[in-house]
Structure formats: C-alpha cells, structure tokens
Amino acid sequence: MSRSADEVARLSAEAMWADDMASQAMGMKLEKVGPGHAVMSMTVAQSMVNGHGTCHGGFIFTLADSTFAFACNSHSQRQVAQSCQITYLAPGRLGMRLIAEARERYRAERSGIYDVTVRTDAGDVIAEFRGHSRAIPGVLVPET
C-alpha cells in the first residue's frame, strides 16, 4: 500500500512528537505539517525572559529549530541539523505567542535546506532562520 505524501508527513510528525520531550517541555504546539513544511507555536513564558525583559534568543532559536526538524523529517527519512543560522529582527516579549513556519527550499538524497520565519500572532517578523539538514540511517514511518 502506497501512502500519500501528506499521510507520510503526518505519520512522521506523530512519531517524532511522541519522543520530543524538549519541544513539549517548552510548551510548543505542532500546528500543521505537510511534505517539506511545518508550523509550530510557543507562548513566551516568564522562565524564557532574559535580563533585558525580552525572550531569550535561545528559546526563539529552539522554536525555529524544532519547526525545521518537523519539516525536514516530513518525508520519513531521518534527518538531523548539519548547520543552522538565525537572524533576530525584533524582540519577543512575555506572553507573546510566537509562530514559526518552515519551508523546504532544496532537498536531494542526503541534504536539504529549509527556511523558517518566526512571527508574532499579529504577523510581525521576529527572526529568520536557515537550517541545513543531513540524512541519517532509518525512517520514521516503516514501508516508505
């Protein structure tokens, strides 16, 4: 039986989410997933605010990185980050709901490039992230 790309993406996300204690502990929510695409959200909690009264960049990076992970693993082939870069454009603030959207830009046999935009609910861009993925052995969904 052949599965659709959307079904493979959904099943891959379910398999990853079950073991992703880091994203769950930070209160992230997987909003949407599809082939080469993912959307996640996170509300900035008191424990995420730094000495400047804004969201620590590491938490914004982690939201973008988790979203990148769900997008690059959406084809079932296990992928890990090879390199990542982020540019912070505006501060996140306490109570702000941040939404990260990842899109596949390039994918070959063992490598991929994904862009992630982190926005507020109002649509203001907080950060731009680019991740390069690398395939590792194994699949998330058997028989794909």
Image: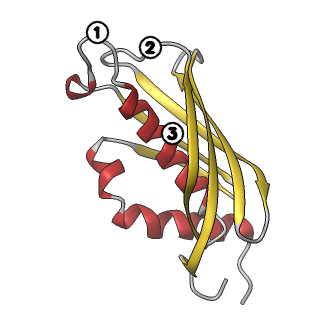
Name the residue furthest top. Answer: 52
Mark 3 and mark 2 in contact? Answer it, CB < 8 Å.
Answer: no
- Give the number of the mark in front: 2 or 1: 1
Residue at horizontal 71 percent and vertical 50 percent from the top: 113
In the displayed structure, does residue 66 sit left or right of residue 51? Answer: right
Which numbered marker is on residue 52? Answer: 1
Q: In which quarter of the image is the N terminus?
A: bottom right
Q: Earlier in the sequence, mark 3 or mark 2?
A: 3
* Residue 92 quadrant: top left
Amino acid type of the residue that numbered disc 2 sits on in the rendered structure:
Pro
Mark 2 and mark 1 in contact? Answer it, CB < 8 Å.
Answer: yes
The image shows residue 26 at horizontal and vertical percentages of 30, 41
In the displayed structure, does residue 130 sit left or right of residue 126? Answer: right
- In this rendering, is residue 46 above or below 113? above
- In this rendering, is residue 121 above or below 106? above
Nearest the camera: 109 or 102? Answer: 109
Alpha carbons under labels 1 and 3: distance apart = 21 Å
Which numbered marker is on residue 115? Answer: none
Q: Earlier in the sequence, mark 2 or mark 1?
A: 1
The image shows residue 7 at horizontal and vertical percentages of 65, 69
Which numbered marker is on residue 91? Answer: 2
